[in-house]
Image (cartoon, grey):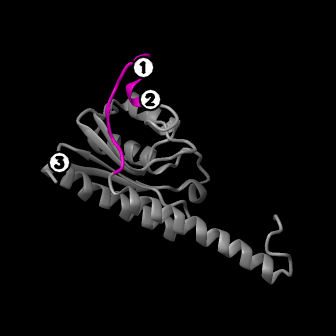
Amino acid sequence: MDAGEKNDERYMRLALEEAELAAAEGEVPIGAAVVCDGRVVARAHNRRETDADPSAHAEFSAMVAAARELGRWRLTGCTVYVTLEPCLMCAGLMVNARVDRCVYGAADPKGGALGTLYDVSHDPRLNHEFEVTPGVLADEAAELLRAFFRARRDARRAARAAAGGPPGECE
């Protein structure tokens, strides 16, 4: 493993810490960190439910915080680390913010916009391209998501059972 891969894992671990904070708050466990010139300038996690904000994705919030911290909207020189492959909204913000790179953990087969369903990072029709490194600590990121959704399903089943309904009944 080279120094770059070690750094990617180190920063992805910060994103995973943020994802754990999200889970503790009842949010989908996705976390992000923005690194600029070797310095962590922002960290965030999902807060859509808490803030009643559809844009409160981990990486979106981290990029906004990074722009504020750096005092500029262009995030050139920055790498965004996020535990789940970004959606179209967040990948679009990466284009518009001119990030240099995105490193993500688990691929998102239902909404991934950096190679799985779409590839916004290298679309020649757009005014900016950026590098993508997929799969960094992917197993850990995916397991956080699986455990979170498993716990939610189990809680719903238990609530239905306590209410006297059949275990498979829809709410």
Residue type at tag 3:
Gly
* Label 1: few (<14), some (14–19) or many (≥20) C-alpha neighbours in 10 Å: few
Q: Which residue is mark 1?
A: 126
From what the image shows, is residue 116 above or below residue 14? Answer: above
Instruction: Determine the CA span between mark 3 and mark 2.
Output: 24 Å
Which residue is labeled 2 in the image?
Answer: 120
Which residue, given by chain and number where applicable, does mark 3 sit on? 4
Circle 3 packing at 10 Å, graded few (<14), some (14-19), many (20+), is few
Q: CA distance from mark 1 to mark 2?
A: 8 Å
Query: Magenta stretch?
Result: 120-135
- Image location of residue 143, percent across then percent down: 46, 64
Of pointers 1 and 2, the one earlier in the residue sequence:
2
Q: Amino acid at mark 2?
A: Val
Position of the N terminus by quadrant: bottom left
Could you say which is closer to the camera, residue 165 or residue 24?
Answer: 165
Kindly report the secondary structure that dominates the magenta region of the rendered protein.
loop
Disc 3 versus disc 1: distance between alpha carbons?
A: 28 Å
Q: Nearer the viewer, residue 81 or 116?
A: 116
> Of the residues shown, which amino acid type is indicated by label 1?
Leu
Q: Residue at x 52, y 49 (%)?
A: 56
| The quarter of the displayed image where residue 154 is located | bottom right
Q: Please tell me whether residue 87 is drawn above or below residue 136 in the rendered image.
A: above
Q: Nearer the viewer, mark 3 or mark 1?
A: 3
Name, please, the residue furthest toward the top: 125
